[in-house]
Amino acid sequence: MSDKKTRFIVVAGSIMSGLGKGIVTASISKLLSTRGYKVIPIKFDGYLNVDCGTMNPFRHGEVFVLDDGTEVDMDFGTYERFLNFSIDGSSSITGGKLFQKIIEKERKGDYLGRDVQFVPHLTNEIKNWVRDVGAKNSADVVIIEVGGTVGDLENGYFLEAMRQLQFEEENVLFVQLTYLPSLFEGEQKTKPTQQATRLLQSLGIQPHIILAREQESLSDEARKKISLYCNVREEAVFDDPLLKTIYELPLILEKQNFYDMISDKLALDKKRAAELAEWKTLVEKITSPKNEKLEIAIVGKYTSVKDAYISVKEALVHSAAAIDYGLEITWIEASNLEKLSNIGEALGKFDGILVPGGFGERGIEGKISAIRYARENKVPYLGLCLGLQLMVVEYARHICKLQDANSTEFNKKTTYPVIDILPEQRAITKLGGTMRLGSWECDIKSKTIASKAYNGAHCFERHRHRYEVNPEFMDQLSKSGLTFSGVYPSKHGDIVEIAEWPANFGFGVATQAHIELKSRLEAPAPLAVEFMKAAVAYRKIREPKLEITKR
Ligand code: GLN
């Protein structure tokens, strides 16, 4: 525990969801961390789920996993991608966790005969939680993103706790994110913002800063109006314009002297300069890369809801920036591939094919066909989690000639269960039942794609899955050329972490881990970078072919 003074920033959304509160929270955090302050983000989600493990990515977007195995909202991915450090599960507060805690305490008799109330019991629990996270991490600043929008029933009690916090702590800053619709001839309308601020004020909270999101950039007139009606100084109204990439936002806020504005209120050192030069260079590599676009196909199941694969997409953005290439991702619905007689029509134009993680049977055969196509045509392939399992299934079926080889997730009666639930997996009683979750160690074999990528003999990556490569088939698969270049040395024997095609098959690597979850703009996922480099090499030999077809 430290007695260092912790400051608090509360970021609340208004008007509508989807305005990018997570990006704002991450960007403000970046402005502070780049000045040497220890910042810890907290996200509050009002839903009654204890964690995100049971949520359908089709409805809620990706389930993000932290090192300690906590399954959290995808905003944590944004925080880590901006901040380049790992956050622990105590930063995720949900309605479910709070109520679970309160009810457990009540059952134990901790409230000594009192009736248990939202105020003070629940609100005290919340304030203690955010203070504890600050103290445990010796944070200079705890930044709290309040999920949902002001006025939601679900986050009302949380905002009440934040209102109380500002009277108990010295330095608490409220940031309101708002949206300005433009009607006819681009006039930016501020009335929704005025009303949203009034709603926040009616809860006893006056925002110190308003960030206005709009389609272009904030007009002077709109800024003046917001200032006048919302009780916020003009310099405290900031522009959150439409950007080419989300990673630009810290630079845009820095340009508007956002830090100067908050440093007074939070008693921070105004003179501390930001170190954003490297960040700026990386952003420029995304917005105007030196080299042409690499065309990558992601063959998945939730492709109509891209948030389901947000970390995969961002990992590709990071790795393309690392090699200064542009990027064009095409989302391909796997089940559509099953209907094609010539899969090359759908996949022929890509420099690389990626199969991400997933659960359930739909689209599985389409993904296997895509992997086969990549292997037979030497298109670089990257498989993530399910993408590894299906790479093994494809290899078993077509190279080892184990005809109906499958994962028991999809065919319980297969003669060759090359992917299966291991007995020790069934015994895992960590969060999420039988899932292997969180960060696990991997031993890497030398002279492989993996050893080149990680430049060493070990790595730690995050997991979220039940099934594994069945150790009974490892020997047969390796004898047929599949290299198991990374394994987790469990006490029951090696468990496959990374697999690679033989070099003469072209570039193909897949991992049981979700390497995308630890990819950050400043530290891209090493295997994704290798994949992109392979895509560049393949594009060079593929391009003349394209020329011929064009003529
Ligand atoms: N469904 C597979 C499993 O549970 C893969 C999971 C994933 O891709 N995250 O093992």
Image: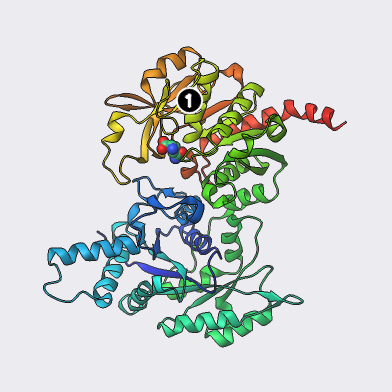
The quarter in which the C terminus is drawn is top right
Whether residue 442 is visible: yes
Residue at coordinates 35% horizontally, 31% vertically from top-left?
Answer: 421
For residue 257, which quarter of the picture? bottom right
* Front one among 72 and 332: 332
Task: Give the tally of numbered discs.
Answer: 1
Expressed as whole percent of the image width and height from the top left, the position of residue 132 reads 28, 62
484 left or right of 490 in image: right
For residue 173, which quarter of the picture? bottom left
Residue beneath disc 1: 499
Query: Whereabouts is ligand 1, in terms of quadrant?
Result: top left
Residue at coordinates 68% horizontally, 51% vertically from top-left?
Answer: 287
Expressed as whole percent of the image width and height from the top left, the position of residue 217 reads 68, 70
Whether residue 443 is visible: no
Residue 313 against residue 185 in the figure, above or below = above
Expressed as whole percent of the image width and height from the top left, the position of residue 375 reads 61, 23
Report the coloring of the rendering.
Answer: rainbow
SS type, badge 1 = strand
Expressed as whole percent of the image width and height from the top left, the position of residue 299 reads 59, 38
Residue at coordinates 55% horizontally, 37% vertically from top-left?
Answer: 363
Residue type pointed to by label 1: Ala
Q: Residue furthest bottom?
A: 228
* Front one among 130 and 381: 381
The quarter in which the N terminus is drawn is bottom left
196 left or right of 240 in image: left
Residue at coordinates 42% horizontally, 72% vertically from top-left?
Answer: 266
* Front one among 60 and 144: 60
Q: Residues within 10 Å of mark 1 (few under 14, many from 20)?
A: many
